[in-house]
Image (spheres, rainbow, N blue to C red):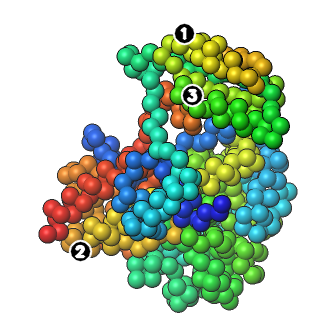
Amino acid sequence: MHLNEEELEVLRIIENNSRIDLKDLAKMTDLSEVDIEITLKKLEDMRVIVRYLTVINWAKVDEYHGVTAMIDVKVTPKRGVGFDEVAKRIYKFKEVQSVYLMSGAYDLSVIVEGRSMNEVASFVSEKLSTLDSVISTTTHFIMKKYKHDGTIFDQTEEDKRIVVSP
Amino acid sequence: MIKTSYVSRTIAELKPSGIRRFFDLAANLEGVVSLGVGEPDFVTSWAVREAAINSLEEGYTSYTANAGLFELRSEISWYMEKQFHVSYRPEDQIIVTVGASQALDIALRTILNPGEEVIVVEPCFVAYAPLVTMAGGIPVTVQTSKEDDFKLTPEQLEAAITPKTKAVLICSPNNPTGTQLGQEELVMLADIVKKHDLLVISDEIYAELAYDEKFTSFAAIDGMLERTIVINGFSKGFAMTGWRLGFVCAPKEISEAMLKLHQYAMMCAPTIAQHAALEALKHGMQDVEEMRRSYRRRRNYIVKSFNDMGLDCHNPGGAFYAFPSIEKTGMTSMEFAEKLLTEELVAVVPGDVFGESGEGHIRCSYASSMEQLQEALSRMERFMKNHCQ
């Protein structure tokens, strides 16, 4: 689908700050607040905007005990539906956060989140690897997140410029 | 016999920059939100910084050719052709300098004989008139006005020309007004320049930061390539202010003369910075595009916010400055800026430091994060309510 320049501009802005005030968004673009609302609705209806997300660095929160694993999955594609059918069966599990079709050594990259390594291990051994089309799985647990979706987690922003300059 | 001063009369008589004075005021306060900064808020892209680190690791710690790395000049030549449709030979028409400031300095010192005049269009960058003076010339200022969107008119230009006029110094998009001259306006000015056989020094340091209209270089106007000295650099568009790397493009005769000054006074621009600039030109244009988009959003935001709070502000076409009028407050620009600083801790630069016609205005840089802009604007709105009811 083709989007116009205003629609693209709205997407670029909210990609970095989905909580931005409608009034400010209107001021930053050449659109009125009403136009912005119509544009956002249209982009949501078209599923160009899929969800408004908050990126949280859970590693900083002591109460959080979650783990994330990236699983390389080799599968047998089926006639007529290729990899789509098995991908669909996998992404419906609530533990699964993302599924990508990959080129190279394996076919699907599946990102799974659980409360513990045991929970993820159980999911892989009992749900994922037992699927008919799945040939093999390789699980990598994520030890630490440095950058996620374009956001650097341990970066503090400091303005190093002098207060007034030419 | 005791000398009264060891300092030359020319330098002794130069006024210190008004920006410096205001910086001293602002530097002593805590919690200041600054719209007074004349440089990008982006840090130089990592790929460029990495290229500089690599240059050190590879041991590039010696001089380059006086005019700069040939590879960099070739890349600049290609960049000028692709972006601005002007052709300069890397062999003898491009010099890599220590910032656009040094490029301006050698351009003026190369062309001026004592007593020759340079037309300087105000409001303008604080260094223009002093640089002319230091080069032995006489700055002749032309005042532009908000009614003309701070654009120099052909009539104003023609009226300022005398038999001693050697050149016109123009900055577009402009610091401090953000005003950008369009192609038609440049053509009209060029006709007068050609009629009177003058040179143009075109400061195009903000060329990459043009938001509404494609930037046109003065040198790209018919018949102007041979009488224009283009000043440009990496500071603003590529967010590389601290690297001190600029360049100057000029007709061969002028360029070769400028190179003499450059080689005796500076030898060459820093080698590491030149390697970094090479990376910026080769692979950094997407970063420039993203920064330009971000500035444009903030430009829209700040200009609309100023007009909403009663600070009349024209829509600047480029650079990252808004230049609203503060006339309706009844204060001078210095009074306004000082009061705003002490009462609301917001730093802006009083317009009069950029020349007489800047009086009645303040320069507000929107090279700040949206959060900083929102905070500054909300403080300014409160200030306006307190002083304009």
In the image, residue A102 above or below residue A12: above
- What's under tag 2, amino acid-wise? Lys
Mark 2: few, some, or many residues within 10 Å (few <14, many ≥20)?
A: few
C-alpha span from label 1 to label 3:
17 Å
Mark 1: few, some, or many residues within 10 Å (few <14, many ≥20)?
A: few
In the image, residue B207 above or below residue A117: below
First reached walking from the N terminus: tag 1 or tag 3: 3
Is the residue at mark 2 from the same chain as the one at mark 3? no
Where residue B227 sits: x, y (%)? 72, 75
Residue at image mark 3: A93
- What's under tag 1, amino acid-wise? Asn
Where residue B152 sits: x, y (%)? 51, 80
Residue at image mark 2: B328
C-alpha span from label 2 to label 3:
64 Å
Question: Is disc 2 placed on a helix, strand or loop?
Answer: helix
Q: In the image, which is nearer the foreground, mark 1 or mark 3?
A: 3
**Can you tell which mark lies on residue B207?**
none
Q: Chain of mark 1?
A: A
